[in-house]
Image (spheres, grey):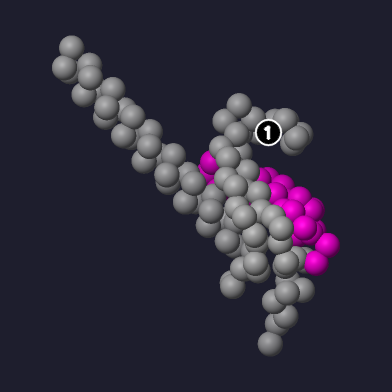
């Protein structure tokens, strides 16, 4: 019985490490989209949609990063969808990267 308990604890620990690594990779992708320094994004909410994102075509498993209210012109709220492996799936608004670039003019 003790062996089963420790195997369960170790499996949970490994799952937590994998989840943390997945979040870190996804957050890095979000940071790439927002640029450096990122604009004021307001409150952040992060959700792992393991059952799939019903608002996306194909309902992929994704991390959803939601921000609001933001200082990005024309985008009071922003949602960024990233796969658990760190691939950008979609941004709302769709032209988010272009809007962020207007805040970071090239020298």
Is 98 displayed left or right of 80 in the figure?
right
Question: Magenta stretch containing residue 50, yes or no?
Answer: no
Residue bearing mark 1 = 53
Task: Say what secondary structure mark 1 lies in.
Answer: loop
Q: Which residues are magenta?
A: 73-97
Residue 84's quadrant in the figure?
top right
**Quick check: 93 left or right of 16?**
right
Is disc 1 surrounded by few (<14), some (14 to 19) or many (20+) residues within 10 Å? some
Q: 103 above or below 50?
A: below
Foreground pick, 88 / 38: 38
- Against 81, is 103 above or below? below
Q: Residue at x 64, y 30 (%)?
A: 52
The residue drawn where x is 28% and y is 22% is 8
Residue 16 horizontal/vertical position (percent)? 38, 37
Q: Evaluate whether residue 97 shows in this view.
A: no
Image quadrant in which the N terminus is located: top left
Which residue is pictured at 40% across the width and 39% down the height?
Answer: 18
């Amino acid at each position: 019985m003790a062996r089963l308990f420790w195997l369960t604890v170790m499996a949970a620990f490994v799952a937590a490490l994998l989840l943390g690594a997945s979040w870190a990779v996804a957050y890095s992708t979000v940071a790439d989209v927002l640029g450096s320094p990122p604009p004021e994004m307001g409150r952040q909410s992060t959700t792992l949609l393991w059952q799939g994102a019903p608002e996306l075509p194909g309902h992929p498993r994704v991390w959803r990063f939601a921000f609001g209210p933001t200082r990005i012109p024309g985008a009071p709220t922003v949602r960024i969808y990233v796969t658990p492996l760190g691939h950008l799936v979609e941004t709302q608004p769709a032209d988010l990267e272009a809007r962020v670039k207007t805040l970071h003019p090239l020298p």
